[in-house]
Amino acid sequence: MALDANSVKHDQLKKWVNEVAEMCQPDAIYWCDGSKEEYDTLMKEMIASGAATPLAKRPNSVLFRSHPSDVARVENRTYISTTKQEDAGPTNNWMAPDELKAAMKKLYKGCMKGRTMYVIPFSMGPVGSPIAKIGIELTDSAYVVCNMHIMTRVGTSVIDVLGADGEYIPCLHTVGSPLEPGQADSTWPCAASIDDKYISHFPEENLIWSYGSGYGGNALLGKKCLALRIASAMAKREGWMAEHMLILRLISPEGKKYHIAAAFPSACGKTNLAMLESTVEGWKVECIGDDIAWMKLGPNGELRAINPEAGFFGVAPGTSYKSNPMAMDSIRENAIFTNCALTDDGNIWWEDGDTKAPAHLVDWKGNDWSPETKEAPAAHPNARFTAPASQCPVICPDWEDPNGVEIDILLFGGRRTTTIPLVTQAVSWEHGVFMGASAGSETTAAAIGLKAGVRRDPFAMIPFCGYNMGDYIQHWFDMGDKLGSKAPKMFYVNWFRKDANGKFIWPGFGDNSRVLKWMCERIEGKVDAVETAIGFLPKVEDLDLSGLKVTDEQMKELLTVDAEAWKAELPEINEFFNKFGDRYPAKLKKEIERLTANLSK
Ligand code: OXD
Ligand code: MN
């Protein structure tokens, strides 16, 4: 076990590891080899220390409880640090690199005392594939090591690919909780104050520094930090796309394969859609990824996508055999649960799952909990499961193909109880970019400190874009120019519309396949659509609603264009885009003007 540091040929990497060790002063340095033995040993240690609870009902699975202050991404402590502030843009927190590094170096000094510093060599994308990127995460958290084992490809083979001078993205992470000699560790160490947390990105030098949080995207640096924030800036420079998108394959009864990449803000059901069980006879979904897509032009000018991750880090509450049977089957074993509730017989439990709360639980804070005396949810609303993608029963056989899959449909959406119809097709690439750029969603629990209400979230990338959002939207227009006639068709969906009684109108989940089928028929030219002010809407008779209990009235409501509601929203969208100042893409302006004129006709 453990990779022999002497076998590492990459002098610059060894130098960096030594420099960080000098600054952070860990008691030991451990190079990860990515083996099962390594995972098992670290997990055993965490069980012995009381940080992890083994689950009798789920083989090789454990539960962690975080510190109550460390439960989600911390967007107001997330920085895009570029030399010029305008390159980070109006939607990102910014600090000059020198200033930010100086502040963080003070915190980093001695921050790993009493701990081991793990060196995690990982690949985003299949190891050795031409589109994969290598990262090296240095962390003092064994929890992070085990999660990275599942979420990325960790190990010796990555060091082999790196050779003596290969490129890698340095990712430095610490929980920010040094231990004095003899001091007992807490079960979830992290920085005491939220003001001491930093999730910092230096896109000009492809560098990530994270301090003070052990949770999810703050700490598993391959995911949001590397595969989205740093990768989006690289993608802009290099002419490709790093997107907050699931990827799925839809197979028609005739065996034709369609590939869909879909962007939804956090906790809008991306994981559910990625593994959907179709309720339309003969149609089948296979999952390629549930959170991130890297998309590049293929040899014939087509758009090809890979999932750079190797696992799922899904929101647990709401996941059930009704909402996502395939996710439930993916987490039966070899899974890590964080901030779920614990049952007396050694299983996990969360709100809106398959079973009613039992008479007694231990809640995510470690306290006794019962349905009668409950004051708050037993599982944290952002409780998570980490599970290998290979355990998903509908994982696509090609999910690790380094050439990726050809994308036919790009889909955007959000959680909107009013205004937005069930599905709308863009009339052009430019219109589709407008749809993606103006996407909005009602806020959720995936990040700390968001105001309630509709949050504009272009392409679901507001928290994840590593450069100026105006330039990012322009990059979408530029990609459209490159793709020309090979460009995928674009659609916008809203599964979350509610009626006057506050009830969801559309059944959602597996029945969303009915909408996906319509999209495939649209791109095949098999069905017509109604051209409206906001784009093409389905004729109700073209949606396959067989066996579904929705009334004509309800379908009408789902497919109406509420021009007044749209008009009321336009000033707010305009105001949001105006923030881009001289980076406001002219083509975007043209689209909002076109929509404004259409709605007034
Ligand atoms: C996630 C998120 O964890 O988007 O995927 O917050
Ligand atoms: Mn996400």
Image (cartoon, rainbow, N blue to C red):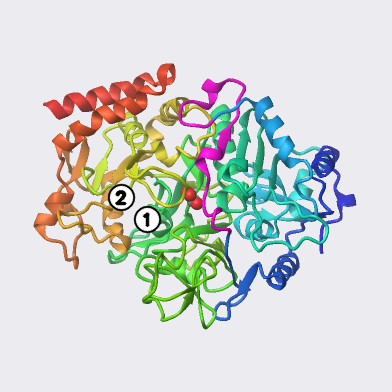
The disc at residue 520 is 2
Among the two numbered marks 1 and 2 on one chain, the one whose residue lies closer to the N terminus: 1
The reply to whether callout 1 and callout 2 are in contact (CB within 8 Å) is yes
Residue nearer the viewer, 92 or 119: 92
Farthest-out residue, bottom:
345
Residue 514 drawn above or below residue 484: below
Left or right: where 312 falls relative to 321: right
Left or right: where 28 falls relative to 120: right
Residue 413 percent across, percent down from the top left: 33, 45
Element assignment for label 1 = loop
Element assignment for label 2 = helix
What residue range appears in magenta? Answer: 67-93
Q: Name the residue under label 1.
A: 256
Residue nearer the viewer, 165 or 520: 165
Give me the residue at 73% from left, 36% from top: 106
Which amino acid, mark 2?
A: Cys
Residue 105 percent across, percent down from the top left: 73, 36
